[in-house]
Amino acid sequence: MSNTEMFKDRNISEDYFLLDIEDYPTTPWEKFKRVVKRSFKGELFVGLWVVLREMIKFDIHTIQYPEEKLPIGPRYRAVHEMKRLWESGTERCIGCGLCEKICISNCIRMETRYDENQRKEVGEYSINLGRCIFCGYCAEVCPELAITHGGEYENASEQREHFILYEDMLTPIDDVLNKKQREFQGFGAITPHEDERLKKTPLAY
Amino acid sequence: MMIRFTIDNIPVEAKKGETILEVARRYGIYIPTMCYISKTTPCASCRLCSVEVKDVDGFVLSCNTPPTEGIEVTTESARLHEERVNIMKLYDVNHPLECGVCDKSGECDLQNKTLEFDVDRQDFSAKDQFRPVKHWNLIDYDPALCILCEKCVHVCNEVIGDDAIEIMMGGYKSTIVPKNSETLDCTFCGECIAVCPVGALVSSGFKYRANAWELSRIPATCVHCSAACPLEYEVRHTGLNGDKAIFRVKNNFEYATLCGAGRFGYDFEVRESNGEDALTKAVDALTKADAIRFSSLITNEEALILQRLKEKTGVRLINEDARLFKVFEEAFSSASGKRFYTAELEDVKNSDAIIVLGTQIATDNPGVRYAMTVASKQNGAKISYFHPIEDDLLQNVVTQFVKMEAGTEEGVVALLAKELLAKTNAPEDIQSFFADLDEGYLEAESNVGEEEFKLMQRQFRRAKKKTLIAGADLFAHPRAKNIATMLGLIEKYSEYKVLLVPKEINTLGVSLICDLDEESKNDSFIVGYNARGDFTISSLHADADLFVPALNQQEGTFTSIDKRVVPTNVALEYEGVCLNDIVKAFGISKEYTVDFTDELVQRDESFEALSFDTLENFLSEVGEDVRGYKLKNRDVSVNFTLEDIEDLPEFNGTVVYHADPVLQFNAYTARTTELPKENFLRGSAQFATAAKIKDGDKVVVDLGDIRIERLFKIEEKLKGTVAINPTFDIELSPNRYRFEKSKIERVQS
């Protein structure tokens, strides 16, 4: 009991002060008086004047969405991206199925097969974004940094089927070749200085 | 005599012949191993199981060292740990870091032990080499992943008997290679896949399709032959929104063994759906039916439902396979005085002398074959195989092949009985019956003589545990009853235990549960249940009038060759109706089919009144079969007459023998995707000459009442004038004797 006592004291610094709020009216007469007072004081025009003043100044800070968009933070968890390898441009996903397994809203499904190059090929991959809660576990568990979150947060659509297209998530091949693919900085990304921590296999044969 | 010693200061007792490792495992003391597999002799290749023994220099391999009185064993010490870590480091040298895609990941011994011994870096180096993946039909081998534990080689040689793979020694370049062959030429049991501790040997049909952690395991029982091997179906969704499907079959490879049909023949489920009025039509058909013809590919519960239907409506039940077995077994037990034959697969494994009679056992029942291989390789058992056709698959284990003439089984059994009953306490009248046999005639006709028996007795001289295996050729023999009586006498008076090999998964169960009738010409309307009829209710036929769930979509019990009632579970759900729903119209259905399990005892007192949910379905940690329960064997009254042996039939000209090729058993296996479906008529060059046909000819086998179209193939390993005709793709009545005279006609193509 005693060790929760500290949380009750909200005065964490000297700068804090309580607002001087007048008491609420209790009788109907007092309430009526307050309405009349507020109606005829002209507070409304104070607000209108502020708007008018800013309009005339032409220094407006409102983002004109959707014409204008704010940059999104590098760790923001929006619609997933499927990344490609920098050198070859091949898809990073190896089809290990860990994202499918860890997904707590059970919205990832994949189908893999043995391809003609003796590799595991991901035949179908789908994330049901209508069900996804963007928790980021899939990005964290991915051993290849193949599935990450991206900044694409506009995912309204008329059809549920549009929420699951793998092609939309995959980095376009031209972007990789032009070095335009961006690594995800957030949940699941490799920690800084990872290179220094690597140990090499001895090759003295 | 128990040997007393201590492991980690815990006092333990060993039986004679047990190793330190076996004792430790029995007492639940952990010793790490990599190459050890309980059902074979120790490979002793990994050395991970090393332990220290007080006053003994160096390490002792616990897997192949029997303890001596009073030793003090330590399983854990700093030195041992260092040794084990070093072993694991060597195993991990250049092991491909492809756990993310490897099929074995998640259930990999190497992965587990690497983590257990905390090997997180590679201190040793070796030049990496290019080692391409080998594709051996149903099996893929990746030498880069192989750790050369030798489990696969040991299992293939000591349990399966194919002896198809070996290690090509070459230091770091060593690999597993097919023995004496370019590519793998074996029965494709896939047991090497099961025992492989890493992802080196994998099923090519499963490869890279799913991961261990996505599959749910359903313990079940294999339905393809009467061995009723335990297996686990592994199930997962298909595609993005697809239905569930069985992805692969696994087994408790440490103790149990599975053949290729069990392992690769799993996708025989029924996916067809019934028409709207199919159920009504089925009820109408059952109402007006004179008889129900059914196969033994059904559960005990279904058999009981059919029996109840008979009791209610008086419909006749026809199942020739089970009826012939019942007749045979009744004649057998009336002579032996026991309700059932006494031998089990475990007895076969422990035998040191085995006689096989009247069955092509390697393909009729691989479970028995593997038990024979274990007996041969691990006990040095001598095996005498009496059959008209020499079986190439048994050449590694059979020590004496006795080529007898087709159709002369009665004569051979009589001669055998005479041989085995001599010098026993069999009563005078039985002895004199066999003494009065016209031996000269029998020997001349059957081609089996004194010389063969003398050789047999000589090689069995030191044997202590003896087994006689008798199979399906005898059940449909015209003189089956007399043969059964003589076998019963062998069981009763000689030291041989007899094992009868029922043909289908539940032949024994149906024979116990149903009152079966003989086929009759008066039956004008027959309903087929898993068999063909005027109205067919089936999970076996693609053109059935009403589909019912296949045996991997049903729960219930089977009665196995071991006289054990084993449960099986639903691997895939089935949307339609099952027999229990159909008979609702007759007022005999229950809520679930398995509600009938505890009523089996009402039909035969060998069953127990246990409900389905109380039946276990696993092998214990030390390998005991604790599935379901065993039927109670009991004494029955002895009441038999030996009939004189008159003329033995002669089979001349072009004779065919009805037997399935490897990996094929029934309509289920015939429709799986992975199993080969080779329905050739196979014969020797001699047969081809006699029938005036060539290899690759399209022929018609004319059996008098039916004509079967086949492609003819010359098989070099076959000899003699008997060709082998597969039956898995045609519905051949089980009451036909398996050898038949035939006319072979070539079809112009």
Image: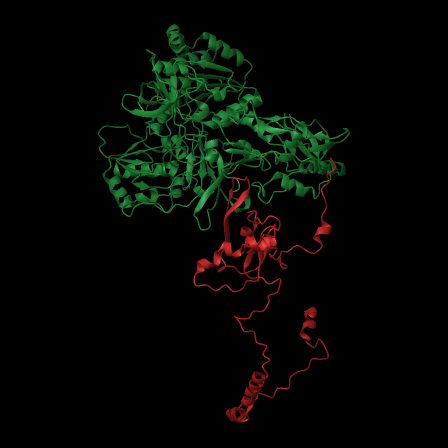
**Residue B359, percent from left and from top:** 42, 21
Residue B639 visible at all: no
When the figure is inspected, residue B740 is found, relative to residue B534, above or below; the finding is above
For the C terminus of chain B, give its image quadrant.
Answer: top left
- Location of residue A117 (image quadrant): top right
Q: Nearer the viewer, residue B428 or B459?
A: B459
**Residue B104, percent from left and from top:** 57, 40
**Residue B103, percent from left and from top:** 56, 41
Q: Nearer the viewer, residue B535 or B331?
A: B535
In red, which chain?
Answer: A
Q: Nearer the viewer, residue B627 or B257?
A: B257
Residue drawn at x 46%, y 50% as measured from the top left: B240
Q: Colour of chain B?
A: green
Residue drawn at x 27%, y 23% as measured from the top left: B705
- Counting labels gives 0
For the N terminus of chain B, give its image quadrant.
Answer: top right
Residue B241 visible at all: yes
B584 sits left or right of B240 in the view: left
**Residue B49, percent from left and from top:** 68, 33
Residue drawn at x 66%, y 43% as measured from the top left: B115
Q: Nearer the viewer, residue A120 or B223?
A: A120
- Location of residue B592 (image quadrant): top left
When the figure is inspected, residue B195 is found, relative to residue B212, above or below; the finding is above
